[in-house]
Image (tube, rainbow, N blue to C red):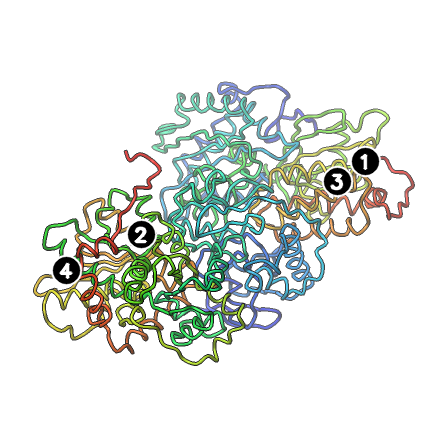
Amino acid sequence: MSITDRQLVFNVEGREYVDLDLYRSRGGYEALEKVLAWDPRQAVHMLKEAGLKGRGGASFPTGLKIEMVRNNREKERYIIINADEGEPGTFKDRYIMTHLPFQLLEGVTIAAYLAGISQGILYVRHEYDEPRSVMRDSIAQAQAAGLLGDDILGSGFNLHIELFSGAGSYLCGEETALLSSIEGRKGRPQVKPPYPTQQGLWGKPTLINNVETLSNIPKIIEKGALWYRNLGTNDSPGTKLISLSGDIQFRGLVEVPFGTSFRDIVYKYGGGPKPGRKVKAVNIGGASGVLVPEEMLDVPLEYGACSRAGITIGSGAVFVLDDTRSILDNVSNRINFFLHESCGKCTPCREGLRQAQIIMEKLLEGRAVMKDVENLERYTRVMQNASFCGLGQAAGNSVISSLHYYDQEYRGQCVDGDCLYGEESA
Amino acid sequence: MSTVEITINKKTVRVPENITIMAAAKLNGISLPSLCHHPDQKVKANCRVCAVEVEGSKNLVASCSTMVSEGMKITTNSPRVRETVRTIVELILADHPQECLTCIRSGECELRQLAFKLGMKEVQGVKTVKRLPLDLSTPSLVRDPNKCIKCGRCAEVCHHVQEVGILYSHNRGLDIGVTPEYGKELKDVACVLCGQCVLACPVGAIYEKDDTDKVWEALGNPDKHVVVQVAPSVRVSIAEEFDQPSGSIATSKLVSALRLLGFDRVFDTDFAADLTIMEEGHELLQRLQTGGVLPLITSCSPGWIKYIEHFYPELLPHVSSCKSPQQMFGAMAKSYYAQISGIDPKDIFVVSVMPCTAKKYEAARPEMKDSGYRDVDAVLTTRELGRMFKHEGIDFNSLEDGEFDSPLGISTGAAAIFGVTGGVMEAALRTVYEVVTGQTLEKLEFTGVRGMAGVKASSVNLGGTEVKVAVAHGLAHAKQIMEAIAAGEADYTFIEVMCCPGGCIGGGGQPYGTTNAVREKRIQGLYEVDQKAELRKSHENPAIQKLYEDYLQAPLSPVSHKLLHTTYTNRCQHELQ
């Protein structure tokens, strides 16, 4: 399938900025017009039929989430667009905001309409100056065109969206930490339940969705659930935006239908490694994702298949390491990242990462013993099993997966390690 | 009550719905490990040592924060759970000083007990303890950030029970810590030194400033005449230090044990409590008769006094000018008692045993020396006294009964109930009623001011006039009343405020494990002391009558004013708008 094929959801085309006129000329806002004339339940049903799942990492069914907010008896409700795209190596939401802002806004408006929400907050990552300013302009333009604000398209439906800027914390992408941050409290995760759909912002039912998720909605309404399902696989309908980076020829954003193999993503979409180099490992899902070797690339991008193969799709970041790279360097880098971003609230994450960092340092300096590696594995396992939120639960994914696939690199760095492969690149 | 069927370790049981896995396990004979969990606090789920397996859940779940549901299959005893819990404790220990042998909390430390229970043999993680400085800035409390396990229990009690809110969990990641704002010291913030954080702490990260050495030194000094006074609530809590049930009345054994420590006289703060009623009761009558500032608010609780000085200084004219019983006792010991015993007041050393950490601060207030000598020389909490008894090998439970010395050890049941919320009010009403009406009060119990409700309002008929009174305990509840007064919406005549939940029986100097359930038992204990007392009205205390006859002349006399009354300070750190 051609990467410029206009038959997908986003149809990413390099630097093209789709302004309001261009967006409308391509059928933009027809979905909203349609929905405003429908019984909202019909549209929610369509989203469920389409099998749209959250693209932020947790892949919760979007139609169900909208319905949960919709059915809440409390009428004061909020929609929050999670644009705190903090996962390293991920830039899909940035692309949507800077290039397809109206597709996002249309999706937001439809979701809000379906859930009976008239107030929204666009929570933009602190570092995203450009997306923030594009979105600010786009919101103003949509408002001026009667597509946002009061009495949208003469329907009587109102939706006001405010911008909120994060303060640079990775963890605030986690929904309960994000809510705390908006409410002026420390950006730390909260106990669930209550879930945000029950008691979210200011204790009111809140629909929190990722930028990419919401941007899928107009296309589903426009072209139907069946069209959407046909794009992907039965298990995972639709497409996924993949942020490609690392040691490959083409780095950037691509949209791939679910079911595409990671091999195709790396070699066809990404053009494969640089000449003369080999793929050593691929990191899927960002810093919180796993590291897998070349042999694993035949796994298709699909929630079920990935889950069975121990791969977390997460935000859809694909980072390629060629044979010049050290696995331990990469893992150590990520442990440092998570230690820096941990809120410190729960023991396994805070103390587990602290110990993991110490052990990684010993490994890199060649001072470690095999017992350290054993402990590292145990600490990360406990972080995964018992951390309070997704940050700690996922922080050790790179350790666990690299210990599985690149055991010899760890052994090679231990003074008492029996390195089976002789000298390893370090 | 609706129930759900769940399975715990393959055993199917029915438990009430809407309870946590931890509570359900407890009902079925399994105490899951916990550190950040506290029975009187909301769920934090920070420490994660209560992790268990639930079928269908990829990760383990925290049993303190996960509710049971129909058909839930829970495993608490799998190798996976065991590894997880032990590793979490290991991780905590790696960042803990492990100075258990010399730690004030030692055997009563929840972390140490948990490590023992889990049979922790080895901590494989690298020790990461930093040497952060201790906060020794106040006379009452010591904060040791090195021992903190970041459970958040202290901050919660500070914010939600007391609503003083000076302790915060702040910073991120490894830098996380619980301290006053911007890492300031306790003396530089509006801490009222109530010590509720001490009771909340599972480890030895915050504790009373230990004054036992000061007392040992005085006891060992032949030139000192060392007298001790014991606060009402200590008699129903000290036995807990010797494994007796909560609320056990141990007055006579306490007296004997104090004698064994070597005090020259064993006196009773209850004596001074009766004296307080005489002064404060007459102050109330005087304000009523002369159109003074009303409502009158009690002044016995030093944490409460510091609180109003910080947060509602504009309401200070409402506060009774009476010193607290502790300070009245000290002032009497160094004046009246010195005179009748012929001992030079400079040689008298007054030790008080208090349920309270703020009392240490109160005793150190510069104005508390009206006799020319510091009223109280050293203040011990119930816990410190327990440690002194243990140090001397005193077999508390098998001691013979002893009696307080005369005259500063003679008291009434009205004084005993000073230790419970509503007790000062009740004691005052017993006296004020009889003074105003000239009639004998038939029913001594004012049940409207009893119990654990946070704010209790009641009214009393004083010779034809209905007088509205209110009682608050726990500063969050005191705050509600202060807001009402500030808004002009409180038409009370007399208000009792106690800083700590339940009153002094729930004070920050009481034995570890002071939960609301324990507080209820101690309350029952003190009411029983009152009920069994021969005299139950302060003005009938013969020693007090003689004190007025021989020395003070009358309540509110110039001598009384000089020795028994005090002044307050505006400690508000911000200009009021």
Q: Position of residue A70 (x, y in %)?
A: 42, 45
- Dot 3 crowding, Cα within 10 Å, few <14, some 14–19, many 20+: some
Q: In the rendered view, would you say A25 is above or below B383?
A: above
Viewer-nearest of discs 4 and 2 = 2
- Dot 1 crowding, Cα within 10 Å, few <14, some 14–19, many 20+: many
Distance from Cα at disc 4 to Cα at disc 1: 85 Å
Chain of the residue under the numbered disc 2 shown in the image = B
Give left or right: position of A219 versus B484: right
Distance from Cα at disc 3 to Cα at disc 4: 73 Å
Kindly check if marks 3 and 1 are in contact, taking CB atoms under 8 A apart as contact: no
Q: Secondary structure at mark 1?
A: strand
Determine which residue is flagged by label 4: B467
- Residue B514 in view here: no
Query: Is circle 2 on the same chain as circle 3?
Result: no
B253 or A116, nearer to the observer: B253
Q: In the rendered view, would you say A306 is above or below A279?
A: below
Question: Residue B526, located in which quarter of the rendered image?
Answer: bottom left
> What quarter of the picture does the C terminus of chain B occupy?
top left
Q: Position of residue A5 (x, y in %)?
A: 65, 26
Identity, as a three-letter code, of the amino acid under mark 3: Glu
Determine which residue is flagged by label 3: A361
Kindly check if marks 4 and 2 are in contact, taking CB atoms under 8 A apart as contact: no
B353 or A39, nearer to the observer: B353
Query: Is circle 1 on the same chain as circle 2?
Result: no
> What quarter of the picture does the N terminus of chain B occupy?
bottom left
Distance from Cα at disc 1 to Cα at disc 2: 84 Å
Give left or right: position of B288 versus A303: left
Identity, as a three-letter code, of the amino acid under mark 1: Lys
Viewer-nearest of discs 2 and 3 = 2
Determine which residue is flagged by label 2: B372
